[in-house]
Every structure is written in structure tokens, then in C-alpha cells.
Image (cartoon, rainbow, N blue to C red):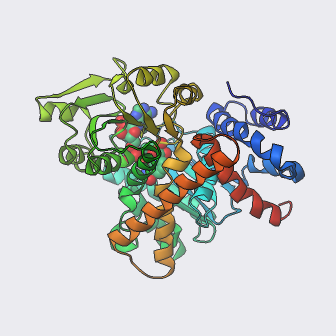
Amino acid sequence: MPQIDDKLAPIYEEVVRRNAGEPEFHQAVREVLESLGRVVAKRPDYLEDALIERICEPERQIIFRVPWTDDKGRVQINRGFRVQFNSAMGPYKGGLRFHPSVNVGIIKFLGFEQIFKNALTGLPIGGGKGGSDFDPKGRSDGEIMRFCQSFMTELYRHLGEYTDVPAGDIGVGAREIGYLFGQYKRLTNRYEAGVLTGKGLFYGGSLARTEATGYGNTYFTRAMLQTGGTDFDGKRVVVSGSGNVAIYTIEKVESYGGKVVACSDSSGYIVDENGIDLDLLKEIKEVRRGRIGEYARLKGEGAYFVKSGEGSIWDVACDVAMPSATQNELTGKDAKKLVANGVIAVGEGANMPSTPEAIRTFQQAGVKFGPGKAANAGGVATSALEMQQNASRDRWTFEQTEARLATIMRDIHDSCYETAEEFGAPGDYVIGANIAGFIRVAEPMRAFGVI
Ligand code: NDP
């Protein structure tokens, strides 16, 4: 296992002690601290004034009760979270996740990752994350609306276009953002378009935001492939998940001539040797909000479904793997299988989908590995572009926005690549992303003094 530098080890031990029972948060902090040994060796001044300790401690954590009434008239209680992690670069920025697995440790890991990701975009946004243990599956539109209204009735007092700007994440798409924005507008009596991103196109949303994370990961992964003199054309690709990130990853990969042969949801995965039929997938997932098994039933010939627990999507042989569902979905065992099957690149669409053992396996095998905090930054970058459009009362075309996104992703790739070289770890995008993101946040923090 990579080691944490002796000077940084006590910081990690303290994080574990003060945040007991939050393994995902420990994992995210550990990965960053493992990279920072190279920085403090060159620049010991970063150890001063507990700068790194302060980065590991959220500026503010808000936990609240969310009561709402279901369709049968029963009162339900969920828990809401917002972790405002770091505002050195700008207002807190990061999505809201509605999923039964959400707890404060999950939100803290996501918020911590978000700090460095947002810094990598080069745009003025700090890091935050929020959500609830509410499970939207099987809930009616009315129930979703009442939940979102209750959630915002507490959260609104902590938000603002200059303070904290949430967006979507797992379980929070355009429908939920609409209900949340409506309630914010009602409570504040202000049309503050820049307070949420991922809005609908009729009321301040940005073209290309829906596509941005999946497209962005595809640009990033393509840039990694190009450093090895190759491209997506003719490659077999596996994309896990079938939500927002996965669908638009599949779309972009297919446009570059890649063949996506498998995708999934929590009920299992499907394989289609002819390449995923995107129209059918969108119809099932975006329109009917159905389960992935329906794809195999409707597609017939060449497609099959494997139930969750009866196999792993990473057993499907591919050249490029793009995990786009959730954290720790790709284990060391999965990585070994992918390597044995000849994978050459992995681009993380989800946040922290590969376990530390999986990352090690890829790197030791010489597989190009793009960590989520760099590879999936296209979503938040385009959210920042949505804020720009809102602030200037303007609206850009799809082409204009996508062109900005493509440039941003290229810059993120290059900055990770160059930083890894500068710090003696050529080709290691994990080290490149962690160090480049850290330096951008550390400098303004130091300028502000001890706050
Ligand atoms: P969606 O809710 O649109 O889709 C999530 C997909 O992942 C669904 O197919 C879902 O299946 C599957 N999934 C979620 N949890 C699990 C689980 N525990 N086990 C198996 N499958 C699961 O979310 P997004 O596509 O927006 O987000 C996917 C990932 O990308 C997350 O890690 C998110 O943090 C990250 N991300 C998203 C960004 C965005 O702009 N949306 C930006 C940057 C990162 P099911 O429907 O069955 O639950």
C-alpha cells in the first residue's frame, strides 16, 4: 500500500480519530495525503499554520430533519445534510445526493473530493456536498415534490449565489432541481437563478449541463488514450451505471467510434455485443424510469441481462472501463479481471468508484487511470458556466458551452499530466490531480490567514 509521508501521518491519524465510523471519508483523505508527501518535501512551508489540517476539516456541517407526508397520508422522516467544506476558491459548490446509503461520512468524502475537483477546473468555486437518506425509488411525483419542498425549507437559509450553490447528483436530476428551485424562490421572494445549477432550460439552465459529466469524462479519457498514441475508435468500452453520467458517456464514446458493450444499474448489468442502443436506453431510463433488465427483454438478439449478485459488470472484457455508478463499485478483484482481459485505460465518471486496491492494480499494470476528481470535473465546470450565464443574464449556445467544456477538460488533463511529471511521478494522474488541486486551494488559504 502507498505510504503516507511521516510528516503527514499524524494528520491522517487525527482525521480518523475525529471522524470515527466514516470509512469513505478516511479513504478520500488518505489518497490525497499519500500524494502530498512529494509536495511537502519540496515545499515544507505548506506544513505551516496547520494548513493541511484545516483543509481536512469542513468549514461548516449542517444536519437537519426533513419531515414530509407520503401519498397515503403518513408522515415520513428523513435526514438532510450539507457539508460546506472549503470556500477558499469561491462559494461552496457541489451536488445533492438522494440515496438511502447517504450519511454524514459519505457527504464528507464527496465534499472533500469536490474541493480539489473544483480547483482543477480553474473556475472560482469552493467545495461542498449535500443530500439525504431519502430513497426516491418508487415514489410518486407528488411525494418527490413534497420531500424537495421540505428539504429546501430548512436548507434555503444556508444557500445563496455568493454563499453555497448546490446541483444534482445520484437521485437528483432536473425534476428535483425544479422543485428545489421553486421552493427557494418562494421562500426568499427572489429570482436568484445562480443559487442552483442543473436547472431546466426554460428557467436559467445551461445547454450541455446534462451531458457535461459524461462528455467531460470521455474527453479526459480520450486525452489519456492519445498520450499513448491511440483513441476510442474501434475500442470495446464498458460503462457502469445507466444514470446521467453513464448515458452521456455512452453517447460521446459512440460518437468517437467506440463500442459500448455493457452498462448497469443496482439490479444488475446488461451486455449488448452489437453496441448499446442509446435511444432504447434513454427511453427506459430517462422517460420510463425503468430497470436495466428491460433493455435485454426489448432488444432481444445479442443482448442479455445478469442479475446483481450473479456476476460483475467488470467481468465483461473491454479496452476501456468507465465506472459511472457509485463509490467503491470496482474492487481489486474486478481490476485484476479487467487487467487480465487487456484493459488499457480507466476513466472514472463516478466519485471514487475504484477501491485503493483497484487503483494500485491498474497503475502497477501500466493502465492509464483517470481519477474521478479530474475525469468527472466536466459536470461541475459546466455548472460554473451556468452560473456565469445567470450572472450575466445571458444564454450560450450548445456549441459554445461544449467548446468551453472541451477546453477545460483538456486543460485539466494537461495540468494533471504536467504536475505528475514535475513531482517525479510521470503518467500518474492520481498524484497529478491531487497535487495540482491542492496547490490551487492552499495558496488562497494562506493569503487569507488563519481562518
Ligand atoms: P444517477 O442517479 O443519474 O445514476 C446513478 C446510476 O448508478 C444509476 O444507474 C444507479 O442505479 C447506479 N447506482 C447508484 N448507486 C448504486 C449502488 N449503490 N449500486 C449499484 N448501482 C448504483 O446519478 P449520476 O449519474 O448523476 O451519478 C453517478 C456518479 O457520478 C456518482 O458517483 C456521482 O457522484 C458522480 N458524479 C455525477 C455528476 C453529475 O453531474 N451528475 C458530476 C460528477 C460526478 P439505480 O438506479 O438502480 O440506483
Is 277 on the left-hand or right-hand side of 129? left
Is 234 on the left-hand or right-hand side of 96? left
Which residue is pictured at 58% across the width and 39% down the height?
103
Q: Quadrant of residue 40?
A: top right
Image location (x, y in percent) of residue 396 = 38, 76
Q: Residue furthest top?
A: 310
Q: Quadrant of the N terminus?
A: top right
Q: Residue furthest front?
A: 229
Which residue is pictured at 59% across the width and 29% down the height?
356
Q: Is residue 199 above or below residue 112?
A: below
Is 309 on the left-hand or right-hand side of 411? left
Residue 172 visible in the displayed image = no
Q: In front: 324, or 7?
A: 7
| Quadrant of the picture in which ligand 1 is shown | top left
Q: Quadrant of the C terminus?
A: bottom right
Q: Residue furthest bottom?
A: 393
Q: Is residue 10 above or below residue 187?
A: above
Is 161 on the left-hand or right-hand side of 402? right
Residue 161 visible in the displayed image = yes
Which residue is pictured at 82% across the width and 43% down the height?
41
Q: Residue furthest left?
A: 301
Image location (x, y in percent) of residue 189 = 51, 77
Q: Quadrant of residue 174?
A: bottom left
